[in-house]
């Protein structure tokens, strides 16, 4: 906007003319002498352009700034609340979850960063998304699968991800668990561990049941991560598991 030569009105100095605009400083010539103002703030708080259409542009700028400041304040408040909840996070015994997934869905799970909890099978909420109430920022989701033609005892651990650090299962209404952007593990076929080696199966044979996911303990997840570090081969896999383990232990207040 060309400001030099524009007529402005000041509450005290009254009418003046813009004589210079350099950087963030605008100079206005009044009958009392030249005055310098900060640009563009002055046109929001102190100066009014006689040209109404030009002033409207500054008013719109002011409104946008107020909206942006309100959004930033809201984001800061959310971040403060997130940090407060993390500091006050209570580590419950069974806050980890093992999911039964189809091997053909792995690409979509890792690309979308979300995993379905399935639906309630009975009761008042039958058919509605299952609420993962025990999952919190300290929770790991263990991805497991069993080929259709294989016995249940051959169920394998396919990978894992930490939930997002702002995810609280009791507030989840859509049945989608959101994964952490960084802490994810996808195991290669030759690194996949046998799931039932870490869990007691039904007697006489292991049985998963009809649910999509099951809760398990922090201690068991730590054992699985230690086993993963021994099972993986590639440098990339090893680094991913190591970083995952470090984060998992830190947020669950465990020693490695």
Image: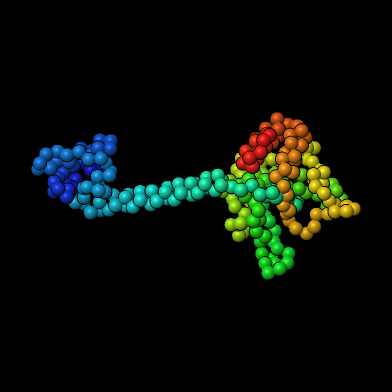
Relative to 223, residue 153 above or below? below
Relative to 1, residue 117 above or below? below
Relative to 60, residue 231 above or below? above
* Residue plotted at (12% across, 42% down): 30
Viewer can see residue 159? no
Viewer can see residue 39? yes
Residue 207 % position (x, y): 83, 54
Relative to 169, residue 227 above or below? above
Q: Image quadrant for the C terminus?
A: top right
Residue nearer the viewer, 134 or 241: 134
> Which of the 4 image quadrants contains residue 18?
top left
Q: Image quadrant for the N terminus?
A: top left
Residue 28 % position (x, y): 17, 41
Residue nearer the viewer, 207 or 43: 207
* Residue plotted at (90% across, 53% down): 204
**Which residue reaches farthest bottom?**
124
């Amino acid at each position: 906007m060309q400001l030099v030569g524009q007529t402005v009105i000041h509450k005290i100095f009254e009418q003046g003319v813009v004589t210079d605009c350099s950087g963030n400083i605008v100079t206005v010539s009044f009958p009392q002498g030249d005055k310098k103002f900060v640009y563009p703030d002055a046109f929001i708080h102190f100066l009014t352009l006689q040209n109404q259409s030009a002033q409207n542009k500054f008013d719109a700028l002011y409104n946008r700034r107020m909206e942006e400041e309100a959004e930033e304040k809201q984001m800061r408040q959310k971040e403060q609340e997130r940090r407060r909840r993390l500091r006050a996070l209570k580590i419950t015994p069974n806050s980890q979850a093992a999911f039964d997934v189809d091997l053909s869905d792995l690409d979509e799970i890792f690309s979308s960063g979300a995993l379905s909890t399935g639906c309630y099978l009975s009761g008042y909420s039958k058919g509605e998304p299952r609420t993962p109430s025990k999952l919190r920022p300290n929770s790991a989701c263990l991805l497991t699968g069993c080929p259709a033609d294989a016995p249940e005892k051959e169920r394998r651990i396919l990978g894992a991800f930490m939930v997002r650090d702002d995810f609280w299962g009791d507030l989840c209404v859509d049945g989608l668990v959101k994964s952490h952007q960084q802490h994810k593990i996808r195991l290669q076929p030759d690194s996949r561990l046998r799931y039932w080696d870490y869990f007691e199966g039904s007697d006489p044979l292991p049985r998963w049941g009809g649910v999509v996911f099951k809760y398990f303990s922090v201690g068991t997840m730590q054992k699985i991560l230690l086993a993963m570090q021994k099972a993986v081969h590639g440098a990339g896999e090893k680094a991913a598991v190591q970083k995952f383990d470090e984060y998992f232990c830190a947020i669950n207040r465990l020693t490695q």
